[in-house]
Image (cartoon, grey):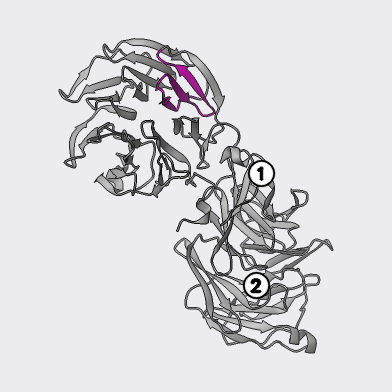
Amino acid sequence: MPSLADQFCSNVHDAAITAAAFDPSSGTLASADATGVVAVQRQGETSPGLVFQPGGSIDGALALVQGGSYVGVGDSEGTVGVYRTDDGSPVFQEIRSGERGRVRGMRGLAISPEGTRCASIAADGLVRMWDLVRGQREVSWSGFGGATVEFDQRGERLLCLDDQGQIRLVDLMSRSGLHVDRLQTPADRACFTRDGTHVLAVGRAGVSLLRVIDGRMVASFATRGGSGLLNLMVSPSGDQAAVVTHRSYHVFSLPELQPMDSKNHGAPDTSGAAHWTSTGIRVGGVDGLFHRGGTGSPGAVTALAGYGDHRVVAHGRRMVFWSRGRRQWDLDVGASVRDLSVDRDGRLVALIPQDGPVRIIDTRKAQVVFDGGPETIGAQQVDVGGPVVAVKLRDGGVRWWHLARNQAFDLSWPQSMTLSGSGVWMGVVTPRGAVRVLDPATGKDAVLPPTPLADVPVKIVAFVNRRADMLVLDRDGVLGHYDLAASIRDNTPAVGRDVIELDVPVDAVWGITGGRRCAVRMNEDNACSIAMVEIATGEVTTYITGLPPNACVCEETGAILTPARASAILERNAEGREQRVLRSLTDDQWISFGPTGIIEASDRANEVL
């Protein structure tokens, strides 16, 4: 069953878009990104029906056959493949890898209209062509360059560029070159017009139009200054052409090659990958989205946290704060965020930048109100509870601030730490692995040190939200539970009990409101699993694998929060069922939705979906 995150978004890329292709005869659209993910959306589909990763990263080498039944892909390792667009099964593959592959990374690819041949241009300057029916390579020609190859309408000629940026038009029957006028300035891309009567060529200095029948230059347009020409396209109707720059796209009439229109595309750090459909031109950005103007999305989720109705999400250096399913604000914090925490009232957010000191954001003002100082650079952990912010320092020890009292504290010896949701308690682990519960307002013991469960050092300590309960995990993987209420009432050390022994490494524990269950996170191989455990019985009631490594759990509700594609976070309930998606869109728009449809959306969300 498709994930809830797949709804209300046709985008599937969480990396820079590096290639795009459109077949006007079938309405099929293909796109690819820097991680090698390929998406194919056929006519009638509201989102890509095929998403797959056939090989390595892709840099421009993507093509559709006329009719849209095949997609051709060439990757940076030199592998070329042709795949069915209905199920992604390979029709043809020639696989390369290692050093040999990298020197022939593919720059451009084409499939002949009848689907019997595939051609490519690689970084080593070789044009290769394969017979897809027999599955064999036909030719390998050296001395070529540029970033494109293309077959004519009948599949009888191949359009290439040589290593000097000059057009080469090859008759595939005789394997001989046809006459073409010399370009005044080198080109790195060339294509046929829709009717096949002309060839367009573009380089950094301008655009040229040549007639196929005699190879004569018939029109040209020179550019001065600007940011360089990155791509060349022809409209679906064939009466216009467009070139893409870093900031804009420019439209020309055909065959006159007269300027008609120019627009800012809004795609951040574009590679030039773009498509032209009946709805217009869209240009791919580094944020994994196609743009037609306006601003980009925040980008992929790099860190997240949630408490009750509140969610805080980092998209690199941009922070987004959600409350009750509505996006409240979007703030550039000046540095990429590695980790963060939000208090249960949603008033304070604490964040650890990749490079810089810990910072505190007041969510009501949407601004940074506190800087932890240079000692907090490289912090291992940050927690916020009520008016207290605590930091586990890079070189060991804990520093915390009671913001309401304007007090700061330091302890050099804690090996681990946590704050209660209210900020009334701070749990710490001593160098010998014992547990202490401190009062953050004084730095002294809030209760007597609890009795150790075993002669095994404790690794992780966590409080149960809104209860006088504490959880500990020792180095043998045994999860234990303490009821601190009796210790407080009788002024005696708390006596705990073992809950469950976990035979996999655990790096986080959360105590869920109500005291009935807790959550544990197990991280390995750039992924994680989260388990819900009944505290009374030690029974695992929910176990979800294959989550992103920064997945987390809301201590108020037990909701499991994970990054999702296209600038979103996906929420599951404590039983693992998908409940809600919060997604940031382009142009500062947003949407939240659940299994039954849209929950909330910004005023113009429908325009950018």
Q: Position of residue 335 (x, y in %)?
A: 63, 47
Identify the amino acid type marked 1: Ser
Q: Position of residue 584 (x, y in %)?
A: 60, 46
Q: Is residue 255 above or below residue 27?
A: above
What residue is shown with label 1?
A: 602
Q: Is residue 213 above or below residue 106?
A: above
Q: Residue furthest right?
A: 405
Q: Quadrant of the C terminus?
A: top right
What residue is shown with label 2?
A: 512
Q: Position of residue 381 (x, y in %)?
A: 63, 63
Residue 304 appears in which quarter of the rendering?
bottom right
**Count of residue discs:** 2
Q: Is residue 583 left or right of residue 187?
A: right
Tell me, yes or no, whether the highlighted magenta stretch contains residue 253. yes
**How far is the residue under mark 2 from the one under mark 1?**
32 Å
Q: Which residues are magenta?
A: 228-255
Q: Residue at x 54, y 32 (%)?
A: 292
Front one among 108 and 20: 20
Front one among 390 and 24: 24
Q: Position of residue 324 (x, y in %)?
A: 70, 56
Identify the amino acid type marked 2: Ile
Q: Is residue 351 left or right of residue 561?
A: right
Inspect this view and state whether residue 111 appears.
Answer: yes
